[in-house]
Image: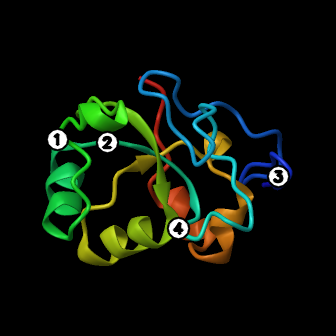
Amino acid sequence: MEPDDSINALGGALEPCSNDPLTGFFRDGHCNTCAQDRGSHTVCAVMTVEFLAYSKYVGNDLSTPRPEFGFAGLKPGDNWCLCAARFLQAHDEGCAPEVNLASTHRRALAIVPLDILKRYEAQAH
């Protein structure tokens, strides 16, 4: 699998999303992607209680540990490379999480318009 260029949604170098928990289609800490990434795991999202509950409700339980896959489960505040379509669905349902645009791959823009992503841009705390 050949990764796409590591360019973020703002046109700069793709910054890391999370190494703890280790995220990304390639499990490299970045929201890198490639043609084989059918889910487009390209949006670096900051997990919230509301979003984790929503994701579980729609069939993708991200909060329950799955030790057999080396997955400890996500908790609020964790960054995670989220599927772009799931982010857009959560936006449409009113429960989208914040995003880190510098860590969101530009390929997300094929699914989620930049103006929508910008509405959820995480602010430095």
**In 3D space, how far apart are the residues under numbered discs 3 and 4 (Cα atoms)?**
21 Å
**In 3D space, how far apart are the residues under numbered discs 1 and 4 (Cα atoms)?**
20 Å
| Comparing labels 2 and 4, the label whose residue is closer to the camera | 4
Residue identified by numbered label 1: 64
Task: Please tell me which of labels 2 and 4 falls first in the chain.
Answer: 4
| Comparing labels 1 and 3, the label whose residue is closer to the camera | 1
Seen as rendered, the residue at the extreme front is 68
Task: Please tell me which of labels 2 and 1 falls first in the chain.
Answer: 2
- For the point 25% across and 69% down, which residue is it? 94
* Circle 1 crowding by C-alpha within 10 Å: few under 14, some 14–19, many from 20: some
> In the visual, does 61 lie left or right of 35?
left
For label 2, the SS is: loop
* Circle 2 crowding by C-alpha within 10 Å: few under 14, some 14–19, many from 20: many
- For the point 78% across and 55% down, which residue is it? 1
Instruction: List x then y, in percent, for residue 74.
Output: 27, 36
Please tell me the numbered disc located at residue 39: 4
* Circle 4 crowding by C-alpha within 10 Å: few under 14, some 14–19, many from 20: some
Residue identified by numbered label 3: 11
**In 3D space, how far apart are the residues under numbered discs 2 and 4 (Cα atoms)?**
18 Å
* Circles 2, 4 touching at the beta carbon (< 8 Å): no
For label 4, the SS is: loop
Q: Amino acid at mark 4?
A: Gly
**In 3D space, how far apart are the residues under numbered discs 2 and 3 (Cα atoms)?**
24 Å
Task: Please tell me which of labels 1 and 4 falls first in the chain.
Answer: 4
Task: Please tell me which of labels 2 and 3 falls first in the chain.
Answer: 3
Instruction: List x then y, in percent, for residue 16.
Output: 64, 30
Residue identified by numbered label 2: 47
Task: Please tell me which of labels 3 and 4 falls first in the chain.
Answer: 3
Please tell me the numbered disc located at residue 93: none
15 versus 26 height, above or below: above
- For the point 82% across and 52% down, which residue is it? 11
Q: Amino acid at mark 2?
A: Met
